[in-house]
Image (cartoon, rainbow, N blue to C red):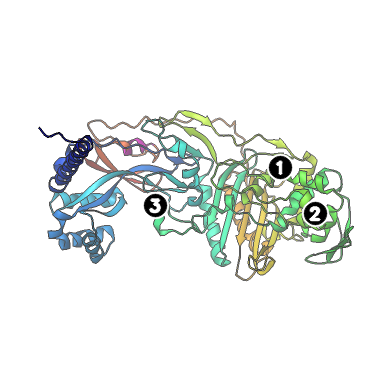
C-alpha cells in the first residue's frame, strides 16, 4: 500500500480546508445575492444607541438625536424599473433623475447608497411609495442621526458629527466621552450650556449686519456674565449649518474666538495700564507728554519710536484710555520693570488657555522676558507683540468688572444623565484676585470716559445706561512680508454694562473690514451699543428711564406632568419642545415637530387610538 509523504499530506489537508472555506463564502454570497430579504430577516439588528442632546441654559435644544434613514438600492431588483423610480425619487430627494440613474448604473456594487441621513419628513414620502410597490429594489436603512433644530445658530461652538455619529468638531468633539454612550449603555449624557438662545440670536443678527456692512472677512462677538464667567452668546461669522456639513467650508467651521490668536491693539491698554497702576508704578495723577509719538533710546543705543494717533499734550492714565494714546501708554510702561509687567499680564490669563473645554483652544502668544527686545515692553503696552484670543479678552475683563477678581470663563454648566439627573457641575477654574479693587474701579471710570463725547468710544454711548468701553484698531501682519499690512486691520471694542457695577461684558472684533472705515471707534462701537440696548432689556439691566421693581427673588413654578402616551393620543397642547424629547425615542411611532416654543396644534386629535407606526405631527409656536 502506497503511503503519502507527510509534507504532501499536510498540503492536501490545507488545500481541502481552503476549498471548504471558499465553498462557505460562495454559498453565503449566493444567499445574499438571491435572497437578500430572507437573509436580512434572520439577522438580529443591533440596538440603536442614543447620543446625548446639547441644550442651552433654558432647556432649548441645540443638538439632538433622531431616527434618520439611508436610501439604499438593490441593483438586481431595481434596474428594470430604474427610470420610473428615479422620476418618483427626484423631487423628494432633490436629485436630478439622470444623477440617480447614473449613480446606480455606474456603481460596481450590487448594493448602492443613494442618499444618506434623511429625516422623517423625506422618509415618510419614500416609505409610502415603497409600500405601494412603486420603488422595487429601493429600501430605507434606519440609522440614528444628529439634527440641529436651530441650524446655523452657535454652530461653530456646537460643532458637528460624522457619518458614524461621532463628534468631529466643537462641543460635539470636545465632549465626545460625555455625549456618546459609554461602557455598553444605550444613552449618552446631556450637556447644558451657558449659552442663552435669545442672546445668541440677537448677537448673531447684529454680527451678520456688521459683517455685511463692513465687507469684513469675519466677525467675533461674545457676551458674558462677569460674576459667573458664563458665556451667554458666542458668535463666529461666517458660520455653517451642521445639518448639511458637506455644504460648508473649513473657514465657515472655524471656532475663531477659541482657536484664533491675534494682536489685540489698543483694547489691550486696559490690561497693560491696570497692570502698571496696580504695582504703584503709576498713579491716577501721573502725567506724561504726548507730542504725537513715543521716543526712547535703549541702553544699547537703539532709538525706539512709536507713533500716536495725535498730539494729546499732557495726559494722565484716564486720558490714555479716553484718547487711546499710544505715547502715554508706552511712557507709562517705562515705570515698571519687564519681569513684573510680564507676571501681571500672566495673572490676567494671557499666554495661557482659558480651559473652557472647547477643542483646539489657543494659548495666545506672550514671550518670556528673556526673549524681549528693548522695544517689547512699550509695544506690548499698546497691544502689539502679543497675541490673544477673544476668549482670553473677555475672561481678563472679568477682573475689571469684578473689582479685581478674575472669574474663569465657562461654556458648559453641567452634565445630566438621560433621565435628567445631575452627573456633575462644570467648573473651569477658581476665581482669583489679580488686581486691587481700587485699581479695577479706577479703570472702569476711565472706560466710562472713553464712551463720553471726548472719547474714542463715543458711538457706543447709551443715554439711559452707563457703559464703559475701550476701542482698538490693530494692524495685521502680512505673512508674505512679515511686516504690518497697510490694508488689513482688526477693529474691536470691549464694553462693560452698566459700567459702575457690570453685569454684562461685550466684546466685538471685526476682521479685515473693507468698507468705509477700519477704525474700531467708528465701526465696532455702534454694533456694541445696539447689542447693549437689546440685551439690557432682555436681561433686566436697570435703565435710567425704566422703573425698577423690588422682588423677593423667589418664584414658584408649577411643573407640568410627565409626558406619557398610552393607548390613546393625549392632549399635547402647551408642552415644550424639551418635554417632547421622550417621544422621539420611541420605536413604535414617528413624531414630526415643526417650529419652536410650545405645542399649539397636533394631529391626530386627543383621544385618537395609538397604532403601530403612527405619524404624529406637532406644530409649535
Assess whether residue 581 is covered by the magenta stretch.
Answer: yes
How far is disc 3 from disc 1 in space, using C-alphas? 38 Å
Q: Can the viewer see residue 464?
A: no
Relative side of 249 to 519, left or right? left
Which quarter shows the N terminus?
top left
In the image, 530 versus 424, the foreground residue is 424
Query: What residue is disc 1 on?
Result: 399
SS label for mark 2: helix
Front of the two marks 3 and 1: 3
* Residue at 46% across, 32% down: 416
Q: Can the viewer see residue 512?
A: yes
* Residue at 24% across, 40% down: 605
Q: Quadrant of residue 419?
A: top left
SS label for mark 3: helix
In the image, 321 versus 219, the foreground residue is 219
Q: Could you tell me how many numbered marks the image carries?
A: 3
Q: Quick one: which residue is furthest to the front in this view?
A: 1
Looking at the image, tell me whether mark 2 or mark 1 is earlier in sequence order.
2
State which region is magenta. Answer: 579-584
SS label for mark 1: helix
How far is disc 2 from disc 3 in space, using C-alphas? 47 Å
Percent from the top left, x then y, of residue 562? 36, 30
Q: Which numbered disc covers residue 524?
A: none
Q: Which numbered disc covers residue 377?
A: 2
Front of the two marks 2 and 3: 2
Front of the two marks 2 and 1: 2
Q: Which numbered disc covers residue 243?
A: 3
Percent from the top left, x then y, of residue 298? 88, 59
Q: Residues within 10 Å of mark 1 (few under 14, many from 20)?
A: many
How far is disc 2 from disc 1 in space, using C-alphas? 22 Å
Q: Quadrant of residue 588?
A: top left
Looking at the image, tell me whether mark 3 or mark 1 is earlier in sequence order.
3
Amino acid at each position: 500500500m502506497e503511503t503519502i509523504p507527510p509534507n504532501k499530506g499536510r498540503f492536501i489537508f490545507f488545500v481541502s480546508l481552503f476549498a471548504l472555506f471558499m465553498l462557505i463564502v460562495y454559498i453565503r454570497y449566493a444567499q445574499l445575492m438571491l435572497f437578500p430579504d430572507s437573509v436580512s430577516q434572520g439577522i438580529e439588528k443591533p440596538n440603536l444607541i442614543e447620543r446625548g442632546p446639547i441644550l442651552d441654559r433654558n432647556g432649548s435644544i441645540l443638538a439632538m438625536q433622531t431616527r434618520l434613514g439611508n436610501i439604499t438600492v438593490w441593483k438586481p431588483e431595481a434596474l428594470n424599473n430604474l427610470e420610473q423610480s428615479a422620476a418618483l425619487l427626484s423631487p423628494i430627494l432633490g436629485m436630478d433623475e439622470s444623477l440617480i440613474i447614473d449613480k446606480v448604473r455606474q456603481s460596481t456594487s450590487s448594493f448602492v447608497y443613494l442618499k444618506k441621513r434623511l429625516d422623517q419628513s423625506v422618509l415618510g414620502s419614500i416609505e409610502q411609495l415603497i409600500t405601494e410597490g412603486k420603488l422595487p429594489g429601493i429600501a430605507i436603512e434606519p440609522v440614528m442621526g444628529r439634527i440641529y433644530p436651530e441650524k446655523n445658530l452657535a454652530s461653530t461652538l456646537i460643532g458637528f458629527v460624522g457619518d458614524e455619529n461621532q463628534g468631529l468638531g466643537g462641543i460635539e468633539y470636545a465632549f465626545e466621552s460625555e455625549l456618546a454612550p459609554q461602557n455598553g449603555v444605550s444613552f449618552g449624557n446631556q450637556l447644558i450650556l451657558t449659552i442663552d438662545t435669545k442672546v445668541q440670536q440677537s448677537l448673531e443678527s447684529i454680527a451678520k449686519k456688521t459683517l455685511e456692512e463692513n465687507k469684513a472677512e469675519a466677525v467675533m462677538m461674545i457676551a458674558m456674565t462677569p460674576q459667573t464667567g458664563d458665556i451667554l452668546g458666542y458668535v463666529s461669522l461666517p458660520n455653517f449649518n451642521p445639518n448639511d456639513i458637506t455644504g460648508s467650508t473649513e473657514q465657515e467651521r472655524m471656532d475663531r474666538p477659541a482657536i484664533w490668536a491675534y494682536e489685540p491693539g489698543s483694547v489691550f491698554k486696559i490690561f497693560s495700564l491696570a497692570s502698571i497702576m496696580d504695582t504703584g508704578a503709576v498713579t491716577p495723577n501721573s502725567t506724561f507728554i504726548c507730542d504725537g509719538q513715543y521716543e526712547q533710546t535703549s541702553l544699547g543705543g537703539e532709538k525706539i519710536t512709536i507713533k500716536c494717533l495725535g498730539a494729546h499734550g499732557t495726559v494722565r492714565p484716564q486720558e490714555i484710555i479716553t484718547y487711546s494714546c499710544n505715547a502715554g501708554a508706552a511712557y507709562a510702561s517705562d515705570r515698571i520693570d519687564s519681569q513684573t509687567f510680564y507676571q501681571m499680564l500672566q495673572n490676567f490669563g494671557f499666554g495661557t488657555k482659558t480651559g473652557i473645554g472647547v477643542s483646539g483652544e489657543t494659548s495666545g502668544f506672550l514671550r518670556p522676558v528673556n526673549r524681549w527686545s528693548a522695544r517689547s515692553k512699550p509695544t506690548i503696552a499698546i497691544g502689539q507683540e502679543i497675541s490673544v484670543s477673544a476668549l482670553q479678552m473677555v475672561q481678563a475683563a472679568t477682573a475689571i468688572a469684578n473689582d479685581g477678581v478674575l472669574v474663569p470663563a465657562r461654556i458648559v454648566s453641567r452634565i445630566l444623565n438621560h433621565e435628567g439627573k445631575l452627573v456633575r457641575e462644570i467648573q473651569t477654574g477658581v476665581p482669583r484676585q489679580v488686581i486691587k479693587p481700587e485699581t479695577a474701579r479706577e479703570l472702569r471710570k476711565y472706560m466710562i470716559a472713553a464712551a463720553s463725547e471726548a472719547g474714542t468710544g463715543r458711538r457706543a454711548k447709551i443715554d439711559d445706561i452707563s457703559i464703559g468701553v475701550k476701542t482698538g484698531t490693530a494692524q495685521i501682519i502680512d505673512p508674505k512680508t512679515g511686516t504690518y499690512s497697510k490694508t488689513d486691520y482688526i477693529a474691536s471694542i470691549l464694553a462693560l454694562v452698566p459700567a459702575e457695577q457690570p453685569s454684562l461684558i461685550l466684546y466685538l472684533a471685526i476682521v479685515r473690514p473693507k468698507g468705509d472705515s477700519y477704525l474700531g471707534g467708528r465701526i465696532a462701537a455702534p454694533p456694541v451699543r445696539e447689542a447693549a440696548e437689546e440685551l439690557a432689556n432682555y436681561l433686566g439691566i436697570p435703565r435710567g428711564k425704566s422703573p425698577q421693581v423690588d422682588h423677593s427673588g423667589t418664584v414658584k413654578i408649577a411643573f407640568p406632568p410627565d409626558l406619557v402616551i398610552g393607548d390613546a393620543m393625549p392632549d399635547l397642547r402647551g408642552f415644550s419642545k424639551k418635554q417632547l424629547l421622550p417621544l422621539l425615542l420611541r420605536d413604535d411611532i414617528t413624531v414630526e415637530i415643526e417650529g419652536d416654543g410650545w405645542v399649539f396644534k397636533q394631529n391626530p386629535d386627543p383621544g385618537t387610538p395609538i397604532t403601530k407606526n403612527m405619524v404624529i405631527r406637532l406644530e409649535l409656536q
